[in-house]
Amino acid sequence: MFKLWAAILKDFTILIRDKAGLAVMFAMPILLVVVITSIQNSTFKLVNENKIAILVSNRDGGESSVQVLDALSKIGMFDVITADSSLSDEQLKTQMAEKEAMIGVTVPKGFTSAIKAKSKIIANKAISELGMEPKDEDGAKPFNPADTAVAPVSMYYNPVLQESFRFSVQSALRSAQQFVETRQILQSLYIALNNKKLPEDLEKQILNNQSSIAEIPASKDGSRSIPNATQHNVPAWTIFAMFFIVVSLSTSVVKEKLSGSFIRLKTLPTNYLLVLGAKQLTYIGVTLLQVLVIFSLGIFLFPAIGLPKLELPTEMFGLLLVSLICGWCAVSYGVALGVYAKTIEQAIGFGAVSVVILAAIGGIIVPAFAMPDSLKFFMQISPMHWCMEAYYELFLKGGGIKDVLYSVLPLLGITFAIQIIAIIGLKRQHLI
């Protein structure tokens, strides 16, 4: 026990003297988690709270086109700015830049008349299919899809707008246009049946008769709290911080090899595996300290700077278990890298790049559900993937110990495999 304690004290002394390594292990992940969470939280606010400026040139001016613009305003997603209807397409693009509008929309001439013609033909066709005669002067015209074509509403967008957000805007425009078309078809149907206009109160009852949608997270503890940017990012970047200790740990192992410390240890009445175990215990302690520091930031600092507070899971033993095993896996990887690296430069370069790659395919940088099928296999063998699955089981899904085991057991398997690889490398180099 004395030998183990002495080895731990030695590694701890070396560690606290490594200022650059401490900055990589603590300062960098703290900065990452604050910046990334702030950016993602701002993105959520952009979608849910802030309005996007949209410049509209209504070249039709009819009832249906006005209703479309009114529906756009009521969606709550846009700040509708009305432009001159006489603007050309090029002039509209220029005004978009001047008014800092990300979206420009033109409603074509004849939009209202086309909507009315389409709704009347559809209504008459429906009445005729029921074996009834439409009660208007036009009669039931033959249904011709070409007659129901409506000139498209044109949407101009700033090229910097991301594809996913552009699709959201398109969906909103389609919803507004569909609402107006449905409203006009209802009017035409009522006129065809009763030869009079649909009463306004009845129209509102029909159009507003929508079933509500209750959004409920599928958490296992029955919690209805909606996960936020903090709940997603703090565990993810804590894992990233844990694995980035491979830079400091692997260089420490390489230095001992290059300085001849391994050879001198053979002359002492001890085994290098004990020294290696002490090194792992020291760095596992560092990973747990990283968890404590970053989680504390989420709890105490984030609310002070306007970010959502980190809510810890109810299963605290599970949190400690997951943190311990994730830390051990990161340490094992660092030791194995140090055993096989021949120079400090190799350890630093390969260690940093490999951690970023593992984070990318493990679901930290890119969400796991968005991973292409060609990378799904590599995701399964990334230890970061199983680390994050375990943390998300606790933080987002409200799982317990049994649920966490499905992620912890594969992580333990990967850790044991890395340990065996490190021992094989030590034996081949005649270091143990």
Image: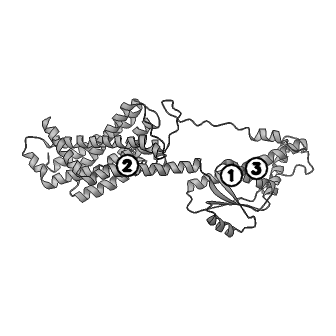
Residue located farthest toward the right when viewing the structure as drawn: 137
Amino acid tagged 1: Arg
Contact between labelled residues 3 and 1, with CB atoms less than 8 Å apart: no
Secondary element at tag 3: helix
User: Gap in Å between the C-alphas at discs 2 and 3?
Assistant: 50 Å
Amino acid tagged 3: Val
Residue at 10% of width from left, 50% of height from top? Answer: 263
Disc 1 or 2, which lies upstream in sequence? Answer: 2
Mark number, residue 30: 2
Check disc 1 and report the residue beneath it: 174
Residue 429 in view in this figure:
yes
User: Gap in Å between the C-alphas at discs 1 and 3?
Assistant: 10 Å
Q: Residues within 10 Å of mark 3 (few under 14, many from 20)?
A: many
Check disc 3 and report the residue beneath it: 180
Residue located farthest toward the front when viewing the structure as drawn: 304
Secondary element at tag 2: helix
Q: Image check: 240 left or right of 90?
A: left
Q: Above or below — where is 15 with respect to 219?
A: below
- Residue nearest the observer in this picture, 201 or 270: 201
Residue at 68% of width from left, 53% of height from top? Answer: 173
User: Gap in Å between the C-alphas at discs 1 and 2?
Assistant: 43 Å
Residue at 28% of width from left, 47% of height from top? Answer: 333
Q: Nearer the viewer, mark 2 or mark 3?
A: 2
Secondary element at tag 1: helix
Disc 2 or 3, which lies upstream in sequence? Answer: 2
Q: Image check: 176 left or right of 319?
A: right
Q: How is the image coloured?
A: one colour
Q: Image check: 180 left or right of 190?
A: left
Location of residue 16 in the rendering, given as x and y in whole percent from the top left corner: 23, 48
Residue at 20% of width from left, 41% of height from top? Answer: 277
- Residue nearest the observer in this picture, 217 or 116: 217
Location of residue 204 in the rendering, given as x and y in whole percent from the top left corner: 78, 41
